[in-house]
Image (cartoon, rainbow, N blue to C red):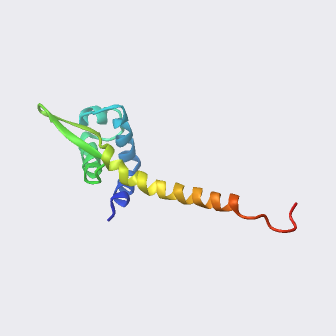
Amino acid sequence: MSTYAQALTALSDPTRRAVFEALRDGPKGVTELADGLPVSRPAVSQHLKVLLEAGLVRVTPEGTRRLYAVEPAGLVALRDWFDAFWDGALRDFKRAAEAPRERGSR
């Protein structure tokens, strides 16, 4: 599976998306993440495992805790995939804007 497809698959789950979005403000431990979600700590751990495997988060041991954070490099494949759509749309717009007008339209 391609990197962007793995990331899209990981983010397709609403709870996993909520876990990922909760990391936007900075690193957090599993307990802190679970406190803000309607799921258990073991469930959050499983969601983090999927996000980790997709390359969207990184984990740093800190004493007895493990802190999770967004992995910016993991977003590159997603951004490149979305940029390809944007580039295509801009190319089509440019082509349409530069095309000669049809005869008979005033």
Asked whether, in this view, residue 49 is left or right of residue 63, the answer is right
Indicate the position of residue 14 as horizontal and vertical percent values.
41, 48
> Picture quarter containing residue 77?
bottom left
Q: Nearer the viewer, residue 101 or 14?
A: 101
Asked whether, in this view, residue 103 is left or right of residue 6, the answer is right
Q: Which quadrant would the C terminus be assigned to in this image?
A: bottom right
Residue 81 seen by the camera: yes
Residue 12 seen by the camera: no
> Picture quarter containing residue 68?
top left
Taking the spot 29% from the left edge, 48% from the top edge, the residue there is: 47
Indicate the position of residue 63 as horizontal and vertical percent values.
11, 31
Taking the spot 31% from the left edge, 32% from the top edge, the residue there is: 26
| Figure label count | 0
Asked whether, in this view, residue 50 is left or right of residue 65, the answer is right
Q: Nearer the viewer, residue 44 or 54?
A: 54
Q: Which quadrant would the N terminus be assigned to in this image?
A: bottom left
In the current view of this chain or complex, which residue is farthest to the left?
63
Please say if 95 is above or below 11.
below
Indicate the position of residue 95 as horizontal and vertical percent values.
65, 62
Taking the spot 48% from the left edge, 58% from the top edge, the residue there is: 84
